[in-house]
Amino acid sequence: MHPQLENAIAPVRKRMQRQILLRYVATGSILGGVVGIAAAIVRILAAGYMPWWLVVIAALAAPIIAVVRGSQQRVSDEAAARAIDDCYSLKSRTQTALAFSQTAQPTEAQLMQIAEALPHLSGVDPARVVTMPLPKKIYGGCAAILVAIGLAFSPVISWQFLHREPVLVDPFANLSPTLGNELEELPDVGTVETATQRGTTPVLFGRQRIANEYFRRQSQQAVEP
């Protein structure tokens, strides 16, 4: 290949390869974010039986594979020459010059075609031929991956706790054994209703009354010498 032709095509070819790599990374980041969030949700619902590092691997596996696969992609010189022709409206001058320069013994007519194309290639700007704006999918994919990694360290749901049978605790189980005799002295419901009808102050009735009376007497006993 003619050196001047190589100097024009090689930078364009490299930028096209980086452009392909960015597309792979963008797709891989989106896929990794979706898979990572799904794995994190499964871990939360599975009560932590899935380790957190599996979620991290699920989120980062797709981007890593995308980088490897994207790095393996190769752009041919013909594709780079075609991109130059399309960008600068050179018809097929660059492609024709490239094809003629790769022949073992180019003819005089072919050498003239190469010489005619070289002046057009002296001012080739690779950034103009191959624009590389950062794909918007990369932002969304990176955000999804960060969410997945954050969920990997979030608290999990304990289904055993949610479905556990409630334990009823009797607050009066440890009260004084003499409390039974004291309860017999409390008025029954009829006595309370009669006191209410008379307009007098009725005696509190129920467990709250029992607890208050018990703890009041215990406090008095603690204060007395």
Image (cartoon, rainbow, N blue to C red):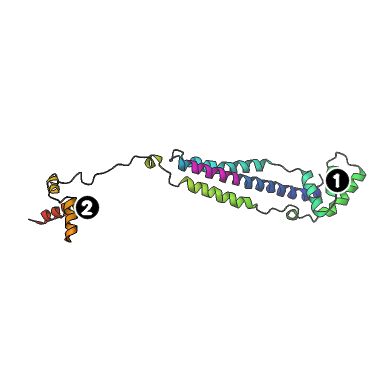
- At x 88%, y 41%, the residue is 106
Q: What SS does tag 2 mark?
A: helix
Lateral position of residue 145 relative to residue 127, left or right: left
- Residue nearest the observer in this picture, 38 or 207: 207
- Residue nearest the observer in this picture, 21 or 39: 39
Q: Which residues are magenta?
A: 29-42
Q: Position of residue 34 (x, y in %)?
A: 56, 45
Q: Is residue 209 magenta?
A: no
- At x 62%, y 50%, the residue is 137
Depth check, mark 1 against mark 2: the one in front is: 2
Quadrant in which the C terminus is drawn: bottom left
- At x 89%, y 48%, the residue is 113
- Residue nearest the observer in this picture, 104 or 221: 221
Q: What SS does tag 1 mark?
A: helix
Asked if 225 appears above or below 181 in the picture, the reply is below
Q: Position of residue 48 (x, y in %)?
A: 43, 40
Question: Which amino acid, mark 1?
Answer: Thr
Asked if 84 appears above or below 51 in the picture, the reply is below
Q: Is residue 6 visible?
A: no
Question: Which amino acid, mark 2?
Answer: Gln
Q: Is residue 27 visible?
A: yes
Neighbour class for label 1 at 10 Å: few (<14), some, many (≥20)? some
State the residue lying farthest toward the bottom: 199
Asked if labels 2 and 1 touch by Cβ distance under 8 angstroms, the answer is: no
Gap between marks 1 and 2 measured at Cα = 101 Å
- At x 72%, y 48%, the residue is 16
Lateral position of residue 198 relative to residue 20, left or right: left
Res. 96 mark: 1
- Residue nearest the observer in this picture, 130 or 8: 130
Look at the magenta stretch and give its main secondary structure.
helix
Give the labeled residue for mark 2. Answer: 208
Q: Position of residue 12 (x, y in %)?
A: 74, 50
